[in-house]
Amino acid sequence: MSIDGDILAAGRVTMVDIARHAGVSKSTVSLVLQGSPLVKAETREKVSAAIDALGYVYNRGAANLRRARTNIVGMVINDLANPFFAELAVGIERVFQAAGFIPLMANTQENPARQAEVLKSMREHDIAGLIVCPARGTRGEDLASLAKAGMPVVTAMRKLAGTRLPSVAPNNVRGARRATEHLIRLGHRKIAFVGGYADMIAQNERCGGYLSALESAGIAADPSLVVEGAPNRETGHMAVARLIATGATAALCFNDVVAFGVMDGLAERRLRAGVDFGLIGFDDVREARFTSPPLTTVGVDSQGLGERAAHTVLRMIHGDTRAEDHVGDVSLIIRESCGAAEGGKP
Amino acid sequence: MSIDGDILAAGRVTMVDIARHAGVSKSTVSLVLQGSPLVKAETREKVSAAIDALGYVYNRGAANLRRARTNIVGMVINDLANPFFAELAVGIERVFQAAGFIPLMANTQENPARQAEVLKSMREHDIAGLIVCPARGTRGEDLASLAKAGMPVVTAMRKLAGTRLPSVAPNNVRGARRATEHLIRLGHRKIAFVGGYADMIAQNERCGGYLSALESAGIAADPSLVVEGAPNRETGHMAVARLIATGATAALCFNDVVAFGVMDGLAERRLRAGVDFGLIGFDDVREARFTSPPLTTVGVDSQGLGERAAHTVLRMIHGDTRAEDHVGDVSLIIRESCGAAEGGKP
DNA sequence: TGACAAGTTTGGAACGTTCCAATTATTGAG
DNA sequence: CTCAATAATTGGAACGTTCCAAACTTGTCA
């Protein structure tokens, strides 16, 4: 009870220090810490007082050694600097935090080797669950092995071929089709699709929606009108030359940041989206509203998708065995870059 | 050596399972795992083979119990959806990952209560170091107590009063002064400062730079020209009415996203930054280049600041006792929103 | 008063590592 | 062939919790 007694305790303060100080056993301290109703109120208070007095901090690592499961969860993002993924991350983190979990975070920069490393590290930390936006080139087995070992894994934005991992993603084909239909309605016939690589599922789906809209409208697809590239501004920027060369009058972009790049390229040539060219993005990133002209885009509610992904993992952690894919609603958000409000003419 | 032997091992595969399988002791397995030069090559191989065969995964939690220090580090961000902080986070994560550390991540949304919770949680996970962008209203003691307990803590972007914690931040006053001087040179006399709250250190510094530039130019400061508010688009947007009412012809914004909001408000009134109004932001977020008009802003190299912060923590973890503050270089990046290229007229 | 039940508390064996001191193998020299 | 030196290996005690079975307190009732 004396100050001296406390000072003698070298190093970290542990439960047995608390126990000694409060005059009970370490088991009782443990019970108090877990809020057990078994301990008498009076005892609980003695223990709490000791905890405050000694500045005890609970050691979750030690507890986890005994316990079944940690409260750590993994979150691997492929491009955190992309506002879409940043918002996704915000949504994920929010629901995990509310549920008492805390995420280990990694940004892979689309590098599968780096992804493999962080996945290994996270496994070693015994994460209770995992959300991953797979880097391009991720093989299904890489994640399937985790799932097979019993870890709840959900993929976000990119469904991996050859696995049964639940995934969360927006309805890419519907979104792309709607957007393309809108451009067609506005009178465009030579419509391009810009950005993404053919080996990305999301690109397949979005490009697929684009193609199906063309087909329904009886417009022949022109392969020279789909330009592949990393989903970044650079790609959009560089694509403009090709768009002009091919005589395209409008484009649906793989995502908003590609569309920003296109705007940039357009501006360099003194052209303006919405008057000289019909432009639509995908994602409805926060910034889309504030470009000039404001970007018409497909809204996917990135934060909501993140929350959904986290909820799914949480459910799996709690034993819900077969979580299903979630295909998020999309909505065409018509601003000015496409050239006209609903029903208008370019 | 038989399959049966493996199957009998229930639950998680541990070092003793590996040891049994390889016919050595757990100590030897441990040595192998740590890459000790003490073990014979042949033995090392037997052990490695066993590890592969049984699918062993190292348990860092258990190791940390014995070891001095974990390889987990904390990263608390106040607004991850703000691209500036997202880029900062990318920089931080990159250097930690390269150094073999992995960050526990939390987004506080400027909520000190939430921040306190995650800090507690991170402490319980025995993080080896911590970078925090303090939520508004954070008291110095909250973090100082961690530092006092021996944990390496560095604050990013916001220096906390009443502590000796090393911090990493751009040279706010110089940046703001430069930007303001530029507006003055362009002929503006009624220049506003928009965004941030007076109780934020960064706001003080930036606003201070702005005031000092005015003073040097012999322009009397007009309190009605500094408008406070959360550092988001909303604030910029709402501020426009006030700017017009006060007859301001230019504004320096607390950060880029506030400036985006101002652009938006301007556009609603059919006004355009760069022709009808001189506008400068702060941070040089990626998006700043792609708005219309492109935003003149103060470049701070967010990613570089993040890297710097991480390096500082790393040095402290390795025993470098007195890390110093880092004040990052800034540069005025002149685009179009201010009304003219260097030396021109509005 | 004794027996029993319910309410509290407790010792000690895990959990999966690390690390020290001690032991056993191997090598080289004489 | 022996001995010392060096190279490899090993057992067991930590680390700070949880959890179980057991033990101790009270209170109640016949």
Image: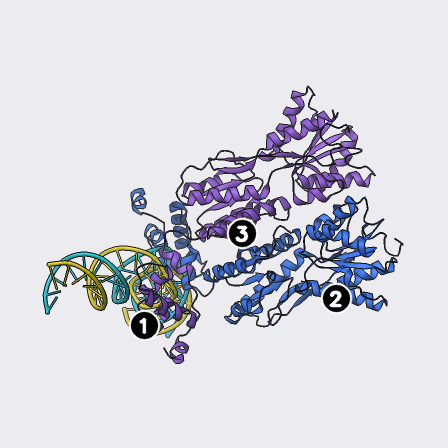
Chain colours: A blue, B purple, C yellow, D cyan
The answer to whether A251 appears left or right of A113 in the picture is: right
Q: Which residue is mark 3?
A: B105
| Chain ID at mark 3 | B
- Tell me the kind of residue under disc 1: Gly
- Tell me the kind of residue under disc 2: Gly
The answer to whether B321 appears left or right of B281 in the picture is: left
- The answer to whether residue B334 of the structure is visible from this angle is yes
Horizontal and vertical percent for residue A29?
38, 56
Horizontal and vertical percent for residue B289?
70, 42
Q: Residue at x 33, y 67 (%)?
A: B43
Horizontal and vertical percent for residue B191?
72, 28
Q: Which residue is mark 1?
A: B23
Q: Quadrant of residue B297?
A: top right
Would you call the spot at circle 1 few (<14 residues within 10 Å), some (14-19), or many (20 or more)? Answer: some
Q: Residue at x 80, y 51 (%)?
A: A335
Under circle 2, the secondary element is: helix
Which mark is on residue A208?
2
